[in-house]
Image (cartoon, helix red, strand yellow):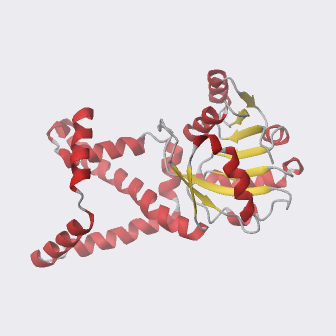
Amino acid sequence: MIPKNIVIIGGAGKMGSFFANLLKDYYDVGIFDKNYKKSVEISKKLNIKVYTELRESINENNVIILSTPIFETKRILYLIALQKECKNKLIFDICSYKSHLIPIYKKFNSSNMLASIHPLFGSGIKDTKGQRILVIPIPNHEKDIIYLKKIFEPFEFDFIELEASLHDELISNFVGLTYLNTLIFMKKIKTFRNYFKFGGTSFKLMLLLSNLILNDSEEQILSICQYEISKKALRQFIKVCDQFIKLDKKSMFKEIHELKNEYADEELYLKIYELLSKLF
């Protein structure tokens, strides 16, 4: 299958518009989004087509990309599966969690090419070369990943295949827990905002991380933090916090020593200081 026409469902969002801008020089790209006003603004800016109806967007394109919030993706994917117009098309999502989508993908016609991806970057990247994208195969559609990769050939992404349940377990800790920790940290220290200027290097790094996360859409942040597997990771983290607080001096020193030996990187440490000197 040679992709020609691509529609991005949720194309008015940050990642949706990012992919629209990325792909528009190689394919005929259109977007569909419930926020029609914003869709029109983006379509004018990128000189791409905007759709007013989901069915029309499916019918006119042979590649369908879902760039929608976690809880919305399942519902929209199901609506697409019900459309007779969706046969013989490549369909994939960029949702942050995957296991809840697999049963819906099984409802599609066998003629469809199906996959699921998770870009490990945000819409602010400038260079796509070497950027990692996790690929989750859909049962009985494992070979369809070949067609998906062809779409992104010009961008030299690094694709890594991963099974859905393992993906979700990893992302709940690497993404979900990071988001929740950031929200909790900022809520805890926001009363000291007038004194942020007194924060040291580690605090500046936390502010930097907070900005990376809080610049996502509120819908995206909410969907990641409200997902049950993210909450599970947070509950496990709280248990570890409680255990750590109860350590005596000798035991805590041992933990610090082991973590320092395993993760401390002097070269990275110097790069962080160099970066912070440019930002603050």
Question: Can residue 76 be seen in the rendering of this structure?
Answer: no
Q: Residue at x 50, y 66 (%)?
A: 229
Q: Residue at x 57, y 41 (%)?
A: 15
Residue 156 at what x, y percent from top left?
57, 45
Question: Can residue 40 be seen in the rendering of this structure?
Answer: yes
Classify the position of the C terminus by image quarter: top left
Q: Residue furthest left?
A: 249
Q: Is residue 49 left or right of residue 258?
A: right
Q: Is residue 180 left or right of residue 13?
A: left
**102 lies above or below 175:** below
**129 lies above or below 47:** below
Q: Is residue 191 left or right of residue 80?
A: left
Residue 90 at what x, y percent from top left?
77, 50
Residue 132 at what x, y percent from top left?
52, 52
How many labels sit on residues?
0
Q: Nearer the viewer, residue 243 or 203?
A: 203
Quarter-of-image position of residue 53: top right
Quarter-of-image position of residue 31: top right
Residue 181 at what x, y percent from top left?
35, 56
Q: Residue at x 27, y 34 (%)?
A: 279
Q: Residue at x 50, y 48 (%)?
A: 130
